[in-house]
Amino acid sequence: MPELRQNFFTKEWVIIATERAKRPEELATHRPLQIVSLFVETCPFCPGNENKTPAEIIRYPANTTEPWEVRVIPNKFAALSRDVQPTRSMQDVWRRIEGFGFHEVVIDSPDHSSCMALLPDEQVARILRVYKERYSSLGMDRRINHVTIFKSHGVDAGASLQHPHSQLIATPVIPGQVRHRLHEALRHYDDDGNCMFCHMVEREIAEQTRVVQKSEYFVAMEVFASATPFATHIFPFRHMASFGDMSATEIADLARVLRGLLARIYIGLENPDLNFTIRSGPSDYGSARHFHWYVSVIPRLTRTAGFELGSGMFINTVLPEAAAEFLRNIKIEKATGAVSYRRIGTRIQRPAGSDAGKGKPVTMN
Ligand SMILES: [Zn+2]
Ligand SMILES: [Zn+2]
């Protein structure tokens, strides 16, 4: 029988459509293997083409006589401008703020052909350190209220360049999805006197069925009321409201867990397009007892159909427990180390019998 499940963090309901249920492997992209070059002459993110991007903000290593391994640059086509002030205006029912903000690109690797699932853990740790540095630095600007760190991997996830990269957008307001979770978290704290995320993690660890991977400091688990197939959260066990509070040891551990999860998805579902975002409280939220940061990974395996767009309620055809078991059983050793090929393409598997394929997915867990 189908089942309605409620997202503990947002109180939103989803339909887990067991009647239409698919085996997890049915959602694999079946993309052909194609050769991708390590270097592409026309790619602005490839080494040697640094003059095709705006001047870099930071790089790793900082010493410019050594080749860079991670670079941060302003987005050439930024959604917001650092050159205006966040001046507010209110006229009748119309409220506006001048388009102030920061939009930066993190170039994950000099290797054009790679992707985060295939990078060594140490390189993923370098990227996470750079995220943290930029997150903290942008968060110190008193005009900024929130920093979103995210990755778009593949054309269907919104990536316009193939070279592996991530992005940060710092805004003078708190985006709706974060605001919603902050409100619910505060309400939960008022009612129960604890962090709803710590509470959920503790229960999920005891329950086990949705846990994909666990380390000393982090757990990756399928979302109980997942709106889309294979939506996965990574939580730190230690209560931390802000991503910027992670220790060096925790960063190294998160790199292993994040890379491991991405590799399971890469191998098991044959390199689907995906997004991930780091959901953190505002950067000065360090000591807040009610909020807890996490990583949300969303493979883009299905498209949003009319019912989802019209109602905001999603129909998920893969049981989260089946998705967790499938990902747990993927052997990830073969994804480690450098490779010079990967699966590319834009093919998307659509649920049979649905009018999926029209419109874009509109939710992140
Ligand atoms: Zn490139
Ligand atoms: Zn917590």
Image (cartoon, grey):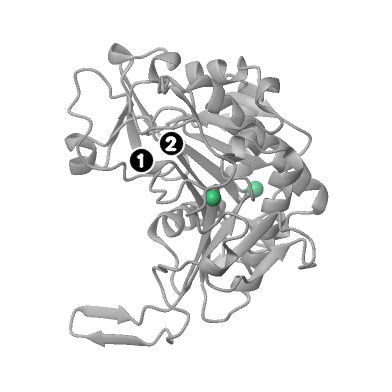
Look at label 1 and name its amino acid: Asp
Q: Is residue 188 above or below residue 22?
A: below
Identify the residue shown where x is 46% and y is 28%.
Answer: 230
Where residue 74 appears, x then y in whole percent? 52, 69
* Quarter of the figure with residue 27: top left
Q: Foreground: 87 or 360?
A: 360
Q: Is residue 5 visible?
A: yes
Q: Which quadrant does the N terminus fall into? A: top left
Q: Which quadrant does the C terminus fall into? A: top left
Where residue 16 appears, x then y in whole percent? 34, 23
Look at label 2 and name its amino acid: Asp
Q: Are marks 1 and 2 in contact (CB under 8 Å)?
A: yes
Identify the residue shown where x is 71% and y is 31%.
Answer: 337
Label 1: which secondary element: helix
Q: Which residue is mark 2?
A: 273
Label 2: which secondary element: loop
Identify the residue shown where x is 63% and y is 71%.
Answer: 57
